[in-house]
Amino acid sequence: MVLLVLVLAIQFRKPRETDVQKYLARLRAQGEKVTFQELIRGIAPDSSLAHDFILTNVPRLPSCNLDAKIIFDDPYGRPGQAGVDWRSPRPPMTSTSGEILTWDQFNEIMLQAQGPLGEIRESLKTASLAGKVGTNAMDSMPGSISAFRNSARWFNVKVTGELHQGRPAEALADIETLAALAKVNLSPANLLSTAWRMGASKIALSATWEALQFPGWSDTQLEQMQEAWEPLDQLTIAEAGIGGERVLGIEYWDLLRRSSISPLANRGKTATRTWRELVKEWTPDAGYRIYKMTSLNQDELFYLAGFQEAIDTIRAVKGGRPQVLQNFKTNAPDQKLGPPSGPPFNRYYFSNLLMPKLSGLVQHMAQSETVRQMTLTAIAIRRYQLRHGIPPADLTMLCPEFLSQPTYDPMSGKPLRYRPGTNGDWLLYSIGEDGVDDGGDPTPRKGATAGFWTGRDAVWPRAGE
């Protein structure tokens, strides 16, 4: 056993705990938040939290199945097209038994849901949108994510119902509620809260696209719709979530250092155990002790560096350098971990357990911001069209009259691609994840499955039938 420990110690060249502390000090000197106290500085605990109202009211909603379509995940019909649910002969809802409902039945159910949905809407106007603030990151976990997801889906189908009945003002109020839902920070210190906010944003963006297919919006109403989306920068939300998750990891590693597992903890439980049983009980504990002696600090340094690389990648995309994202997709830290195995032979044992798929996560966050940028641009184009009678000749004509600052394509770091048509229509698109401008062709490449991000370019969907 002594020989094994020496071999492992030489192999892994164990960094000291002070090396971790020096690394954290460098991060702090760069302005990074590496403790829970730094993370919540300026956030005052509030006894009136919006998510408490949501958790209370969602169980009061009627039982049914909601079909809250996310058009930017699953375009309808041909690539670049999406169905308009409020024009559909059937509502986006079925009974709990799967029965297709009529619009009249849909309206009856929405009347039953009016009370709890109204309370949720009002809470988002008056209660705090901050998350639960405990004494540490581990004590600040969010409540039931399913309740928040259900509330977003209910308001999504409510928008559809209001538009079907020709009530755009009510639909606009519901879109503003959906945007407010995406601002609710369920926890300041983990990615679960960030994933919820980005998921709520996707649902709300889909509802906004549905609303933009409705005729008769005034410039004031479109401006309100635009203002609902301007604060919801998806990359800023993502950066905060990844930073919070890093703090959670730092607390976890500190807990690992302070924990003590005795290899003889099970002694005396059974008087008749064999030597083989004793060895089986002792081995995992011994492996963990060797891991702590040889690899724990190196593991934490790998974990911290991986999260910093993800944060730096997000900042690079925000700064107009999308090539960093392309490199991160293929060289992300989580792709270097390999298959999980137990200590002591896996020097990144806890990184394997705790580190999320950062490559896919950052990619998804960049996608979400691309859709938000396209939505803001589409609303501004509609406003220009309403005021001037024709779409703008190019996107520079939207500033500063309709946009306080130019929108951009996170996939290229340049303006979104735009082409006005000859009959009042227009084409708006991102060059997509391959970084190649295919002229707005959303057709999936050979062998790719259909979807908003699998096409050559990610096109603002046209209304399909």
Image (cartoon, rainbow, N blue to C red):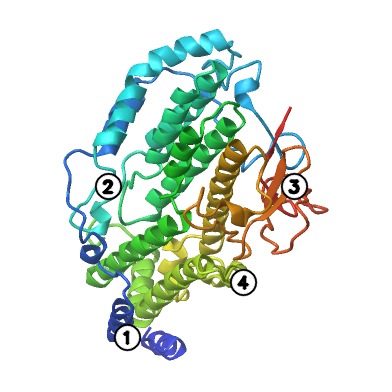
Q: Is residue 262 visible?
A: no
Between the C-alphas of marks 3 and 4, the distance is: 24 Å
Between the C-alphas of marks 2 and 4, the distance is: 34 Å
Name above or below for residue 224 compared with residue 296: above
Name above or below for residue 383 compared with residue 237: above
Q: Which residue is mark 3?
A: 449
Q: Secondary structure at mark 3?
A: loop
Q: Which residue is mark 1?
A: 19
Between the C-alphas of marks 1 and 4, the distance is: 31 Å
Residue type, numbered disc 1: Asp
Q: Position of residue 285 (x, y in %)?
A: 33, 68
Residue type, numbered disc 2: Ala
> Answer yes or no: do the residues labelled 1 and 2 have beta carbons within 8 Å?
no
Q: Which residue is mark 2?
A: 130
Give the mark nearer the N terminus: 2 vs 4. Answer: 2
Q: Please tell me which residue is depicted at 34% across the width and 29% down the height of the picture.
A: 121
Give the mark nearer the N terminus: 3 vs 1. Answer: 1
